[in-house]
Image (cartoon, helix red, strand yellow):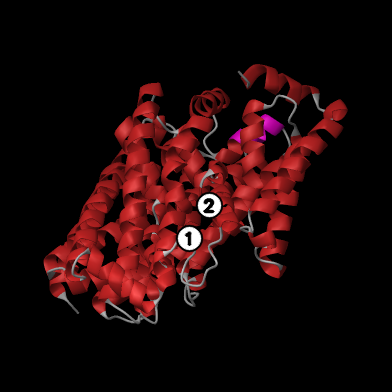
């Protein structure tokens, strides 16, 4: 156990806990616990909005799984990862002002609040909540695994012990502080992620003898490592272009990202976040994935590629600096986990319990239930993470695809197409989710494309066709909603 590496991480965790305590004091004085706990009172400024989007999107996949699969696949995966550069810009451009205005008018606190009010159908709400719970459990499991791998690599503790330490650390500060703690810590974590990326990339290049030496070693081992097609030639142009649906266009449908477009203070904050978020995401994605590839020349023959980042930090940097750098992936993982935890617990408490079971529940009961559900969800994810897959990133991308197949068209067309209705939304969710699960299960990658592409196309067709067929049956209430909210 390397104390020099561990001490900076302990300092980082203490700072995070202090922020959670400060945020909890704000919650204790809140007049609207649900809005403040799950949405932070809609008070995010531009820099904080950018950093919370970066920190939420940059996860265990970006700092553990991404470098791991880049180590395995080579520079082709770096090119694939850079598709994500436009993610923040794309989300805030498509949703942006229109989504924020509509959700404020509706007093929506969650993405499902928006869908409930827009479509006026309980089955849209129930299926949406079920989709979030199912797929975000997969995404959270990936983050728990990433955190455990990081702690295991640093401390030498067993994987299960490391997993327990990580789970307890995250649960404490999320339960204490809610979204406000998440947003504040995301700001710090975003800065840590940028600094960590610079240091680990520079240290890896130096340890490898420079870029030209590293490239020569990679070429000598396998010439495909330095081509756009990956070590095994599977990164074809069709697959790479279709991957953009998953990590580019489709990200609009991710609840954990969409909720950020509900929480900013004003238009100026959004415009600042567009610029800062795009630059920071691009820098982190390029730096971390290049580190993974270059790490193959420094640490050849790793049997578990997902360990490349923490092992590189301890190999090429002094212990104290390695500890600071390893706070970056810890920051990325914790910032994503906390957001996902809140979304799942809000789906259970706000979208199901308060909407359909006990709409007049007292504030005290809501408070206790929110904290309790967040804790229970975290414990369930802990048990799911005990047996990790070979590549962590597969869990995260599976969750991305399922959520996008479910939500992209009900959200986007619900904003922009007045003829869209509950029939279209229901059909889109059902067709998208079922087709995605079937394709992933039985025929992963039809026609060489990523598994999410066909479900997104089918769910789009289902939304259009069923909305038009159900137009004559559209309720008067839904017509009033469209007239009232759509601009």
Position of 186 with respect to 476 (left or right) is: left
Q: As rendered, which of 243 and 89 lies closer to the eye? A: 243
Quarter of the image with the C terminus is top right
Residue stretch rendered in magenta on the structure: 114-119
Residue 344: numbered disc: 2
The mark nearer the N terminus, 1 or 2, is: 1
Q: Residue at x 25, y 47 (%)?
A: 191
Quarter where residue 252 is shown: top right
Q: For the stretch drawn in magenta, what is the main secondary structure?
A: helix
- Is the residue under label 2 in contact with that under label 1 (CB below 8 Å)? yes
* Disc on res. 140: 1
* SS for dot 2: helix
Task: Please check the rendered image and state whether residue 227 is part of the magenta-colored stretch, yes or no.
Answer: no
- Position above or below: 402 against 142: above
**In this rendering, would 369 be left or right of 215?**
right
Quadrant holding the N terminus: bottom left
Q: Nearer the viewer, mark 1 or mark 2?
A: 1
The secondary structure type at the circle numbered 1 is helix
Question: Which one is nearer the viewer's eye here, 168 or 447?
Answer: 447
Q: Position of residue 392 (x, y in %)?
A: 46, 68
């Amino acid at each position: 156990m390397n104390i020099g590496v561990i001490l900076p991480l302990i300092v980082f965790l203490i700072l995070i806990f202090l922020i959670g305590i400060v945020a909890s004091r704000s919650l204790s004085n809140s007049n609207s616990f649900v809005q403040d706990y799950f949405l932070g009172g809609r008070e995010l400024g531009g820099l904080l909005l950018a950093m919370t989007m970066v920190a939420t999107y940059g996860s265990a996949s970006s700092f553990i799984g991404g470098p791991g699969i880049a180590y395995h696949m080579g520079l082709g995966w770096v090119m694939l990862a850079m598709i994500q550069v436009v993610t923040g810009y794309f989300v805030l451009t498509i949703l942006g002002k229109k989504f924020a205005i509509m959700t404020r008018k509706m007093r929506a606190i969650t993405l499902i609040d928006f869908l409930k009010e827009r479509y006026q159908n309980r089955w849209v709400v129930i299926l949406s909540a079920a989709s979030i719970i199912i797929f975000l459990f997969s995404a959270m499991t990936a983050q728990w695994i990433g955190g455990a791998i990081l702690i295991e690599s640093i401390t030498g503790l067993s994987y299960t012990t490391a997993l327990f330490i990580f789970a307890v650390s995250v649960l404490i500060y999320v339960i204490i502080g809610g979204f406000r703690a998440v947003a504040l810590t995301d700001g710090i974590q975003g800065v840590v992620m940028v600094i960590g990326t610079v240091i680990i990339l520079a240290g890896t290049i130096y340890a490898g003898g420079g870029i030209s030496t590293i490239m020569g070693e990679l070429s000598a081992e396998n010439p495909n490592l330095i081509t756009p097609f990956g070590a095994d030639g599977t990164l074809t142009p069709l697959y790479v272009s279709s991957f953009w649906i998953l990590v580019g266009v489709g990200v609009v449908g991710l609840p954990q990202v969409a909720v950020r477009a509900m929480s900013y203070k004003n238009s100026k904050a959004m415009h600042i976040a567009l610029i800062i978020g795009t630059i920071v995401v691009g820098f982190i994605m390029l730096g971390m994935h290049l580190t993974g590839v270059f790490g193959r020349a420094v640490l050849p023959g790793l049997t578990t590629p997902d360990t490349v980042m923490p092992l590189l930090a301890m190999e090429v940097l002094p212990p104290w600096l390695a500890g600071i750098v390893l706070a970056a992936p810890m920051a990325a993982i914790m910032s994503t986990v906390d957001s996902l935890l809140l979304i799942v617990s809000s789906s259970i408490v706000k979208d199901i319990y308060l909407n359909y079971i006990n709409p007049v529940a007292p504030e005290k009961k809501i408070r206790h239930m929110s904290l309790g559900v967040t804790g229970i969800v975290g414990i369930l994810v802990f048990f799911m993470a005990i047996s990790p897959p070979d590549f962590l990133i597969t869990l995260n991308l599976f969750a991305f695809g399922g959520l996008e197949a479910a939500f992209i068209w009900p959200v986007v067309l619900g904003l922009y197409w007045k003829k869209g209705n509950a029939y279209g939304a229901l059909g889109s969710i059902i067709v998208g989710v079922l087709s995605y699960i079937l394709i992933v299960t039985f025929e992963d990658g039809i026609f060489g494309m990523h598994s999410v592409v066909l479900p997104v196309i089918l769910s789009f067709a289902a939304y259009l066709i069923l909305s038009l067929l159900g137009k004559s049956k559209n309720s008067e209430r839904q017509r009033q909603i469209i007239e009232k909210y759509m601009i």
